[in-house]
Image: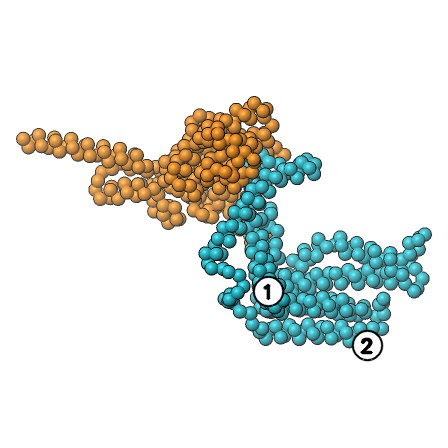
Amino acid sequence: MLKDITLGQFFPGNSALHKADPRMKIILTMLYIVFVFLAKATLSYIFVVFFTVVLVIISKIKPVIILKALKPLIFIMIFTAFFNIFWTKGDSTPLFEYKFIKIYKEGIVFAVLMIVRIACILTGSCVLLTYTTSPIALTDGLEQLLAPLKKIRVPVHEFAMMMTIALRFIPTLIEETDKIMNAQKARGADFNSGGLIKRARALLPVLIPLFASSFRRASELATAMECRCYRGDKGRTRMTKLHYKPVDLFLLILMVTFGVIIIVINIYLIDILNFSV
Amino acid sequence: MNALELKNITYTYSKKTPFEHTALKNVNAVFKAGQVNGLIGHTGSGKSTLVQMMNGLLKPEEPGQVLLFGKNIWDEPKKIRDIRFRVGLVFQYPEYQLFEETCEKDIAFGPKNMGLSEDEIKRRVNGAAEFVGIDQSLLAKSPFELSGGQKRRVALAGVMAMEPEVLILDEPAAGLDPIGREEVFGGIRSYQKTKENTVIIVSHSMEDVAAYCDNLTVLKDGQIMLTGSCGDVFKHERELTECGLGVPKISTFMRLLRENGIDVKDGIYTVDAALDEILRLLKKDDVEKKDGGNKNA
């Protein structure tokens, strides 16, 4: 059923990562991605995996959920690995040679490292941000991080509000789609047979009512917001103010340590486990 | 004869996730052919889940069975679409499913999916429009131009046009004004009288089911709590009130009269019947008074 799709991907909980400030989590995610890309040596990749596992443990998110998130990306990973195996040229003699196809040891190592990198970035940003931050907190954090841009007249608040509303209505729209599909199925609509064009046509009885109700909802929401005197960003105060807490400092120190170790490995320990490219 | 028979129906939403929720627990129920059957229950009691079982939108967990005139609808899963033509289901707020350019085309959507001939479709559209009192002039209009009550009736006609053997309506009058309600129920009644088909009305308005249904099934927390004729069911005033449903006000009124020593009959649940009963008593009183007066003289 459509309802079973976990959109927004937020899993409520009370781990350190859940409690951390969304602004800090956005910064941490960006730092994390930069550090992962800095990793060069095989040893640093091992450390990246280790650190990512630590993050997953801190977040208390079940590993099954993370594996599920990685599943749809298997194709991209295999695709990337495939190209790296065939396109990387090494110094040593090829391990395998057939006409113009040459496979080097470096190619295989690089392909494996690429898969590790993609998997780690995905897992890391999921547990740091999307899995542990409610969509509302996320937009809130984003708005405040980008607040300086207001000085050059970027409508940051308006964008954040639009995002909040869009996220808020995703589950509602899914439910609505489910309902309308069922109603049309009850009148004999058939969504699962026929060619592409027939199937696309079969969706019309769902899409038109869906659009109609979205417009109705939008105008109702606009009226409701006006009734409560919403007038945009100017002079607007917040009910929940974001404050940095000790846990944020702890996470920041952890992340910086991670970055430092990666850089140290890159500079001094690059020759250990030397498969690097 | 039973139009629909539900046997051991259990259903759980979002199975094996943290959001798991059992909507129906081992439900057994029958809905009689040619009658208006009422299905009542408080919000979240599983009414809407149960009606989606009846036309095969949801499949009961093993070993649950849904029998339509004695035949399990899941015997041939590939032909489940045909079941949906035989068991017409009108969802809550059906006006939100209208999509065609004209009302006529929208009503014709179901019959067209059945693969009927043009002439037959035309006949059915006109027939259905007549049942619900939608004028010929409205048929050429866009459904988005109509009033709320009119839209609702067009949506009803869209299911009636399939001429289902069992017509199920989920809260058909929700959110309508008294005139709108009367029009909707009038349409359902004229459909049922003409076709003599089975109708199932889902509602939590006791007044509505008391006025229109021949028998009632009460659902509570995904289980059948009571079943029987309206009179029988409304005798359980205390239980019904406890589960947040209550009984028609007139039923309570008659009970209070009886408790205060006025000898009204048991099992009255419509205003009309109550009026007749009270008039009968008043007449009897008059006769007795007259008799008494004569004796004294």
**Which amino acid type is shown beneath numbered disc 2?**
Tyr
What chain is colored cyan?
A: A
* 10 Å crowding of disc 1: few (<14), some (14-19), many (20+): many
Check the residue under mark 1 and report the chain it is in.
Answer: A
Q: Up-down: is A234 above or below B161?
A: below
Quarter holding the C terminus of chain B is top left
Please state which of residues A206 and A111 is positioned toward the viewer in this rendering.
Answer: A206
For residue B186, side relative to residue A7 (left or right): left
Q: Up-down: is B6 above or below A46?
A: above
In the rendered image, residue B102, in percent from the top left (x then y), is placed at 54, 33
Check the residue under mark 2 and report the chain it is in.
Answer: A
Residue that lies at the very extreme toward the front in this rendered image = A152
In the rendered image, residue B276, in percent from the top left (x then y), is placed at 26, 33
Q: Which mark is residue B122?
A: none
For residue B211, side relative to residue A106 (left or right): left
Q: Nearer the viewer, mark 1 or mark 2?
A: 1
Residue on which disc 1 sits: A143
Task: Report whether residue A21 is seen.
Answer: yes
* 10 Å crowding of disc 2: few (<14), some (14-19), many (20+): few
Q: Quadrant of residue B285?
A: top left
Q: Quadrant of residue B277?
A: top left
Q: Colour of chain B?
A: orange
Task: Report whether residue B89 is seen.
Answer: no
Q: Earlier along the polypeptide chain: callout 1 or callout 2?
A: 1
Q: Please give the name of the residue rendered at 50% of the width and 36% of the height, measured from the top-left corner.
A: B155
Q: Please give the name of the residue rendered at 60% of the width and 46% of the height, measured from the top-left corner.
A: A1
Residue on which disc 2 sits: A268
Please state which of residues B221 and A157 is positioned toward the viewer in this rendering.
Answer: A157
In the rendered image, residue B217, in percent from the top left (x then y), is placed at 42, 39
In the rendered image, residue B6, in percent from the top left (x then y), is placed at 50, 37
Q: Up-down: is A212 above or below B1?
A: below
